[in-house]
């Protein structure tokens, strides 16, 4: 299983990188297409909005159709969208292409659900952690790769090379056993994704955490290129910060294993404290590159840790509805990322870097406040184990109560 996990982690990293390439290239792409610096955040925002739509409309399909076929089809269509971006010659064409890239890059979350479904229950946290590590490393190395390639061959080469990689992944995706499919129509599938918010307190808490965490993450990485560009750093030098910050993502790899051991709540609170603290260093970016480097490592360690814990926790709720749960959860990730991108770039052009850091710190404190609130998770653990509680009300799963009764996971996680 380990080679398969590594392959899925690499594929997820390649796919998600497409959502973040533009963050390092905002100034260059804006100048090439005649877009004002204060509005270049729209490149990131439109991609994230497309990503959010894909999370709701495409990822849940993994519970309805064969995940392997769905993943291959998404990679092929993603390659077409990347080719459109790489050949765009006006702002409208570029924005349409970026929206399509975001829509189809949600294949990353299909890969997370795929990895979880291939793993034994005791190994799911580790599997999710491995693939999620690939995702976060892909996000961070996207900046390094895009900066280097732009300096060598222009920003369009970034998207064209990624197009080729996406096609290669589609051709080499390994075979997997057939999965259990939901006996639902597509409309019922989408409805069950929407209603999980009201039916699962754990989901509400973890989704809210995702919103705050990735709003903070996007606040830094969508805007940091602007003060670094003002200091006359090259694309390669700016992208190198993604390589440095990848150390934080790698350091967070044990988060999935700790969640398997029932320590998810402690891990989440500790990481939320680190996230809020990181801004005390990041605020010194205009004066110290080292402060940014250390602060970025701490921030990415915290974000990765919380994200792995979140996904491991929500998948445990109803494994048969894994794609819907992860897709619905990631909608909040996408909304937070889009909000952080558009607010941070607008704030920097009007108020400077300190205002951006205050925004990021506010989002981080929101994450901390959500993490320390334990009542909803305790209530869910008890509620989900009530005899006869099935998914009929929200259409998510008709066997959840039975499975819960046959396992001790509710007792195991009642304190998370």
Image: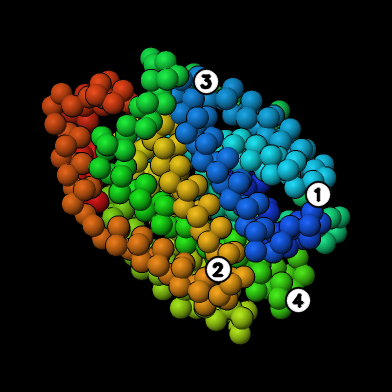
Mark 1 vs 4, N-terminal side: 1
Q: Secondary structure at mark 4?
A: loop
What sort of colour scheme is used for the picture? rainbow
Residue 125 in view: no
Please state the horizontal and vertical placement of residue 306, each as a whole percent of the image.
Answer: 40, 55
Crowding at mark 2 (Cα within 10 Å: few <14, some 14-19, many 20+): some
Comparing labels 2 and 4, the label whose residue is closer to the camera: 2
Instruction: From the image, state whether disc 1 or disc 3 is nearer to you.
Output: 1
Give the Cα distance between marks 3 and 2. Answer: 44 Å
**In the drawing, does residue 414 fall left or right of residue 126?**
left
Q: How many marks?
A: 4
Residue indicated by mark 1: 156
What distance separates the C-alpha of mark 2 from that of mark 4?
20 Å
Q: Earlier in the sequence, mark 3 or mark 2?
A: 3
Q: Say which of 156 and 118 sits in front.
A: 156
Q: Which residue is mark 4?
A: 232
Where residue 395 is drawn, which disc sits there?
Answer: none
N-term mark: 1 or 3: 3
* Disc 1/disc 3 C-alpha distance (Å): 34 Å
**Of helix, strand and loop, which one carries label 3?**
loop
**Mark 1 crowd level (few <14, some 14–19, many ≥20, 10 Å Cα):** some
**Residue drawn at point x = 35 percent, y = 50 percent:** 208
Q: Gap between marks 3 and 4, in whole Å?
A: 49 Å
Residue lying farthest bottom?
287
Q: Secondary structure at mark 2?
A: helix
Answer left or right for 339 relative to 104: left
The image quadrant that residue 79 belongs to is top right
Say which of marks 3 and 2 sits in front.
2
Extreme-right residue of the structure: 153
Q: Which residue carries the number 3 mark?
A: 66
**Residue 136 coordinates in the image, percent (x, y):** 55, 53
Q: Position of residue 60 (x, y in %)?
A: 46, 28
């Amino acid at each position: 299983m380990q080679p398969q996990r590594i392959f899925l982690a690499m594929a997820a990293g390649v796919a998600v990188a497409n959502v973040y390439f533009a963050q390092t290239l905002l100034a260059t792409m804006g100048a090439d297409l005649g877009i004002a610096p204060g509005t270049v955040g729209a490149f990131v925002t439109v991609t994230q909005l497309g990503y959010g739509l894909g999370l709701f409309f495409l990822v849940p399909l993994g519970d309805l159709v064969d995940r392997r076929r769905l993943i291959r089809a998404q990679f092929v269509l993603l390659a077409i969208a990347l080719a459109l971006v790489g050949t765009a010659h006006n702002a409208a064409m570029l924005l349409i292409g970026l929206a399509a890239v975001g829509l189809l890059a949600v294949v990353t979350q299909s890969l997370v659900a795929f990895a979880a479904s291939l793993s034994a229950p005791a190994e799911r946290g580790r599997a999710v952690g491995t693939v999620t590590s690939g995702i976060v490393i892909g996000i961070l190395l996207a900046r390094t790769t895009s900066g280097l390639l732009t300096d060598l061959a222009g920003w369009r080469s970034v998207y064209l090379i990624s197009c080729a990689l996406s096609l290669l992944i589609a051709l080499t995706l390994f075979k997997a056993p057939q999965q259990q499919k939901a006996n639902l129509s597509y409309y019922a599938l989408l409805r069950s994704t929407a209603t999980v918010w009201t039916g699962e307190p754990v989901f509400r808490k973890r989704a809210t955490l995702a919103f705050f965490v990735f709003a903070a993450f996007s606040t830094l990485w969508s805007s940091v290129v602007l003060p670094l560009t003002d200091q006359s750093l090259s694309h390669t030098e700016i992208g190198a910060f993604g390589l440095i910050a990848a150390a934080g993502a790698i350091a967070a790899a044990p988060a999935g294993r700790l969640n398997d051991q029932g320590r998810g709540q402690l891990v989440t609170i500790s990481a939320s404290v680190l996230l809020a603290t990181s801004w005390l260093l990041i605020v010194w970016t205009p004066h110290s590159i080292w402060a940014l480097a250390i602060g970025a490592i701490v921030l990415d360690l915290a974000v990765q840790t919380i994200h792995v814990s979140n996904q491991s926790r929500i998948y445990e709720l109803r494994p048969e509805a894994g794609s819907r749960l992860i897709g619905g959860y990631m909608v909040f990730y996408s909304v937070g990322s889009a909000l952080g991108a558009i607010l941070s770039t607008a704030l920097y052009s009007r108020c400077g870097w300190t205002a951006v850091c205050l925004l990021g710190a506010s989002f981080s404190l929101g994450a901390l406040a959500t993490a320390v609130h334990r009542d909803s998770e305790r209530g869910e653990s008890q509620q989900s184990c009530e005899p006869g509680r099935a998914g009929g009300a929200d259409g998510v799963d008709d066997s959840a109560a039975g499975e819960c009764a046959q396992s001790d996971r509710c007792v195991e996680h009642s304190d998370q």
